[in-house]
Image (spheres, rainbow, N blue to C red):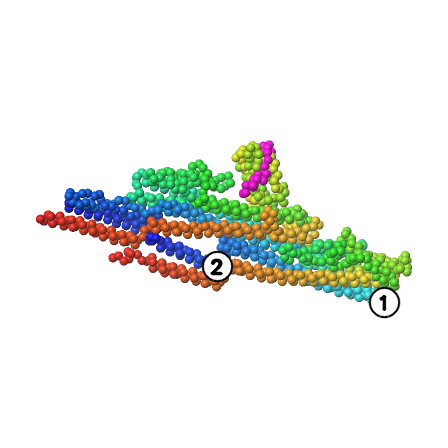
Amino acid sequence: MRVTSSMPFNQLARGIKEQMNALTKLNLQLIDGKKITKPSDDVSGTVEALGYRLSLSSNEQYQQNLTRVKTILTFTETQLNQVSDTLNRIKEMALVGGDASITDSERDYYAENTTLLKGFLLDLSNSTYENRYLFSGFRTDQKAYAYDSATQRYLYQGDSGQIPFAVDRDMTQVMNFVGSSDDPSVTTVFSFTLADAEEVTLSDGSLVTYTAVPDPGSGTTSIQVTISHPDHPGDPDYEDQFSFSNFMEMADILAHAWRYEEVDGTPLNPSEAFRRVQAMVFPLEKAVEQVITVRSELAARQIFLENREEGLRAEKEVLQNRLSAVQDTDLAETIVSLQQVSMSLEALRRSSARILSQSLFDFLS
Amino acid sequence: MSLTGLLNIGKSALSVSQTQLAVTSHNIANVQTPGYCRQEVIVETSSWTTASGGPVVGQGVTVKTIKRHYDALLQQELFLTQQDYGKYTLLNQTLSGVEQLFNEAQKLGLARSLTDFFNAWQDVANHPEGLTERYLLLKKAEALTATAQKLEQGLNDILKNIEKGISESAEQINTLAAQIARINGQIMRSGTQEGTLSANNLRDQREALLAELSQLADISIFEDPANGAVHVTLGMRTLVDGDTSRSLTAEIDETGRQTLVLNGEDITSRIAGGKLGGLLTARKEIEETVLTGLRRFVAALINAVNLQHREGYGLDGSTGNDFFSPLQLTVRDYSSGADLTAEITDYSRLTMEEYTVRFSGGNYYVYERTTGELKTSGVYEPSGTTINLEGMRWEISGTVSDQDSFQVSPLTTAVAGFQTALTSAQQIAAAGSSSGVPGDNENALALADLIHQGLTVLDNQSLEDHYQYLVAQVGLKTQEASEALTFTENFLNHLNDRRDSVSGVSLDEEATNLIRFQRAYQAAARLIRATDELFQTLLNL
């Protein structure tokens, strides 16, 4: 091939341009620490990195969700512990206070204490976290329970709403517990239901029947309590009937029984009153069991959340590592490449300077 | 032979050497002139004559021609490669600008705003009664709409520059065509044939201009052997014919785009190479792939969010509200006297396609704009024709001809009209039940999950997957242009080297020639001196 004067110059210019491009690219990679500076550098790498960043963003959001809900569940747990303690204290009093041998002052003490504890239960049922009522289902702006002086009942103002939150893609966990529900599959904190009618025999031989009656109208389930004596069938002195639909009403019935009266103030004879106290022991045991069930479910949710949190942390680490592998510059490799390109450029400049400086004209005199 | 004959031989040798020295000097002087072809003096002996009774001797030397070292095939190949080089240089530059808008590697683009928006829905789901979370969601929605609009604005700015580039290129082409025609005229008028210094130089100038023109558009060149003029065509229409050139004009059509008209014919679709071809290809790629892709993505997002949002209930109990301003149909009327009105009747059935309505033989035909797939057809009634198609109702009336058409698109204003439609945070429909209860977050969760859900209008891709696809498309287009440019540049360099090898000036070669011709000149002068001495000898007898 015939070599002409402009060819070495053109080749030098091209060589320098290529080396400078390589040098600039490596330099950019060192400046921002990324080996992909624009999508066309590595299209599949860019898309892969973008996918990891989107997944990381979701992952961080799920972790935030978890943190928030864990806080709510921890708060709920402390409230449930107090509900449990309160119910146990009422149950202890019912166990010893259902006997006519107790003194009037003991009876007054039980009545007074149960009334106080009922108020405490009501406060607990209306617990709020960040201005939302915890046990009202979806009706977080409403107190879960309110006393209705007309009916002398504690009315449930919430619903059975189970509030889910996202813990991962296509995975949710319910964050709340409701106070009451007419749906037996829903776990409730301040009421319980019975799958079948239950019977208990009292110390005087009276038979107590407990039946759960769901009421879709109020969204609650009430427990109907019927007391009768097999030896005195049809005798009004031995027959009694009342109902309750939450723990506050249970405490109210008890407190009034110790005062020898119905919740509406209608007098009860002492034997009837003590039968009521004894008849409330079984529901109180059920109530305590119910709270234990709720606490177990809460603990299970917490364990699930802990596991999910661990899972999300591990996933985040994997995503970060992959993202780093795809987009981050390998500093050692890049610096070595940079040195190689610098050396090539230097060699090109030196050799070109020698070749280009020579011409036959230099040797003509 | 007489002594005078000897003097004539010396004179011819001196003259030829002078010409050779002149051509060598010209070569040296043009060593850096772009497009210059090395020249060489081809000499031959003067005609033979017979001396009376003696042997045959020559009468000296003469210049046969001045050869221009030039490879016509190579030059043609060079012109073609320059067309590709011009095209891919422009395409690479333009698509790099588009790529920068979507440069997710530098955290530009839409991904962050998109995830922030859907994460904000999760925050609302976590605290559906919280007004703070609701206000934050509205702010994130504003950020998302602003980012999408910024992207569209960036693309529109690039498209505006392309339109400007098209008209500028047309002007440059006209200037070059006029210059080529002028040189053609000079070559034709002077009757210069190849082999003289002036004809060679005019051809060099013309080739440099043709090379420049090749970088601008995919021209075809044909040299008329009869008069030496080149005939240049562009888009199968004549641009330069002898000493006259035609004007390429950039005209704006009804869509606002520039079309290129030569000799009264629209040749836009026939231009595929050079800078102009690059500009037209870039415009098509950006409009049909990137801009339409972005609009389809935003339209799918708006519609999916709205459809889900309508299902829910706000804190104020309101329901059926759109979260974003709903999509609007845009109608482009390419008819002489007909009218088409369009409305969306069922947002859930929208396919996010664009449609073309054409008429033929008293029937209407509706095609999907990009694929040309026939969607529906029927008899056209000029008094009023109703077409119900994929969640839309169109009413067409008026007299139509077979040349008339309409374009209907739900995408054109998707990004420009991308804004939140809610007037208060209370209206955010987080609840899924009709009672409007504040703790209900069912709909908020469903909305938060939309980013991961496959959407039919996006070929069952989720929003995040489709956005990744969009970024990949932009990256791939740029990568293709960059690779094509690298290949073409390397090939062009190779061709330039080959051309330089044939036509370039070597200073060492010229230096050698300089010595050679100088020596020849000295020898010729010596011959004259020797003859002179012979004359003196004779005169002194």
The magenta span reads: B366-384
- Horizontally, is B431 left or right of A275 in the view? left
Report the residue at 76% width, 61% height from top: A290
* Mark 1 nearby-residue class (10 Å; few <14, some 14–19, many ≥20): few
Residue B370 on the magenta span: yes
Residue B227 % position (x, y): 33, 38
Report the residue at 39% width, 54% height from top: A14
Report the residue at 44% width, 61% height from top: A338
* SS under mark 2: helix
In the rendered image, is residue A131 in sight?
A: no
C-alpha distance separating marks 1 and 2: 87 Å
Which image quarter holds the N terminus of chain B? top left
Res A280 quadrant in image: bottom right
* Mark 2 nearby-residue class (10 Å; few <14, some 14–19, many ≥20): many
Residues B187 and B326: in front is B187
* SS under mark 1: loop
Residues B533 and B385: in front is B533
Specify the label residue A29 is tagged with. Answer: 2
Chain of the residue under label 2 = A
Res B181 quadrant in image: top left
Residue B133 % position (x, y): 63, 55
Check disc 2 and give the amino acid type: Gln
Check disc 1 and give the amino acid type: Ile
Report the residue at 62% width, 39% height from top: B388
Residue A149 on the magenta span: no
Residues A125 and A49: in front is A49
Specify the label residue A341 is tagged with. Answer: none
Residue B99 % position (x, y): 50, 51
Specify the label residue A102 is tagged with. Answer: 1
Residue B49 % position (x, y): 19, 43
